[in-house]
Image (cartoon, helix red, strand yellow):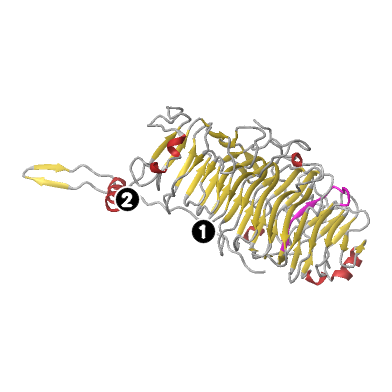
Amino acid sequence: MSEVRYGKMTGLHATIAFRSRVRIAGNEIVKRKRTPLWLFLFVCVCTIAGFCSATDIYITPTGTAQGVCTTSPQPPSWFNTASNWGSGSAQIGPGTTVHLCGTISTPLTAQGSGSNGSPITIFFESGASITAACGGSGCLNAAGLSYIVVDGGTACGWSSMMQGACNGTIKSSTATPSGSTFGIVATTCSNCEFRNLNIGPFFQAVAYGAYPTGDVRGIEGGGGSGTWLVHNNIITYASSAIVYIPSTSNDTALQVYNNVTANINSSVDISNNNNGTMNAALIHDNHFGSTAVWDQTGCSDHHNSLHAFAYTTTNNNIQYYNNLIDGNWGTCSTGGLFIEGNGSVNNNVTVFNNLWNIASYTQMNNGIVYISAGGSVRFYNNTILGLMQSGDVCLGVLGLTGASIYMENNIISGCNTLLSNGTGSNISLFTDVDYNVYGWNTSSPWTDQNIPVWYSTISSWRAHCSCDIHSTFGAASNYVGLNSSGVPSSSSPAVGAGATLTGLAALNYDITGTAPERAAPWNCGAYTLRSAPPNPSNLTATVP
């Protein structure tokens, strides 16, 4: 396995002290007034460069004082005017923090970029929101810009398996808007960051009820260059929570982490339809909840928590890890993870430490996890728990050509078919499939659709695939020995049954991302043997 290194970027701060100089004039000692270093540097930079933007700008619904926004507050129209952005001392530019106060009912469109080390920050003060008729241009638009930070003001979202409430809100002013409605539009936004926000609701979907006439998205964007970060947000009531469109020939910008979604049709869409080449993406430590409110007669829209697709251009090196997928999935599910496309266009996809623990669904159209159109798919230490509903499939692979499939240390339980090799995928691609724990199945745990043949015993499956030599299977409903949160009991066959894997640093810990580090031999599944922190199941959201 190739090694992947992770690192954390930390800020460096230096403090420099200066002594006052002393001038002797006759018998009189005169001390010069000390000039703070920061002021000296500020003056020098502003003088040499010829510009310094405002440090703080305050925006209120009408331009009158509200909350902490009392210093020369401006209305939204001022923010949306290009002449108020630039290098002047009263303009929005690099290093400016734009403070939002109150309920702003006009969509905001940023007119300029920050710079490296001096981003423009749009900051939501306590109780602030953009509640507007957003349309396809978004409640907040930062398209084509760079070094923009949008901050809800209070750390929130999903962290270490715990959920915290957010402060700043971006949502639609109507429950059922017509046409496309987007929360944030940030296409080709380079080095941009969106954090600590309540995003939504945008369309109050009700199962088999009214359906939007256009796209409804929480955040739409693409990296351009640098980074494109979405983290610590709660996103509700949108057909797509996060849509990312690769926009360059070497797009490595996307990172999505510590978010919560609920009542979303699709949580993270990597939508690469002849746009660019994605060469890295990290989707981790998120909680993706219920989708059932988007059910429609005939299932015109299928639900996915994680969806990546490509057809002629490619998505490379996507990593999905430490994610919890649960809730009510209704009747129109495609999969909790759906990798889609033509040929080997999703390359080196790595999926580890995820838990699919879906509380309710009528059927899974393709499989709880469904991987097609990939090369070198790696699937380690995941837990998939099905409900034995309508011929459901826990894990399906389809149409993989020229791929290698690595599947180790997983717990797969509770589906009519636990593992399906679909039409067009040669079983010889199962390069390293072993050390898995399979459980709770009626009569056909494994299938190869190319023949097609269903295999009812693990010995017959081993003989066919030349895999799963060290794996185990039990037909009892409680065979895998997990509690309702997916944590194994001390007597679970998953305890100590895994291979010791190295190379992915985050894989050394379980889904919580915290100590204790996995001890050899490893457990199968997403958890080490210990109590999990409490976490909500059937996550839903209530429209304010």
| Of the pair 392 and 34, the residue shown nearer to us | 392
Expressed as whole percent of the image width and height from the top left, the position of residue 288 reads: 69, 46
Residue 80 drawn in magenta:
no
Q: Is residue 486 visible?
A: no
Residue at image coords 21%, 42%:
33
Q: Which of 249 and 397 lies nearest the eye of the viewer? A: 249
**Where, by quadrant of the figure, is residue 247 drawn?**
bottom right
Residue 217 on image: x %, y %: 63, 44
Which region is colored magenta?
Answer: 378-391
Q: Nearer the viewer, mark 1 or mark 2?
A: 1
Quadrant holding the N terminus:
bottom right
Crowding at mark 1 (Cα within 10 Å: few <14, some 14-19, many 20+): many
* Coordinates of residue 155 in the picture (x, y in percent): 55, 41
Q: Residues within 10 Å of mark 2 (few under 14, many from 20)?
A: few
75 up-or-down from 40: above or below: above
Circles 1 and 2, Cβ within 8 Å, touching? The answer is no
Identity of the residue furthest to the left in this view: 26
* Helix, strand or loop status at disc 1: loop
- Amino acid type at circle 2 is Ile
Task: Give the Cα separation between the discs numbered 1 and 2.
Answer: 34 Å
Identify the amino acid type marked 1. Ser
Tag 1 residue: 225
Q: Quadrant of the C terminus?
A: top right
The answer to whether 449 appears left or right of 226 in the picture is right
Q: Residue at x 52, y 34 (%)?
A: 106
Going from the N terminus, do you reach mark 1 or mark 2 first?
Answer: 2
Label 2: which residue? 16
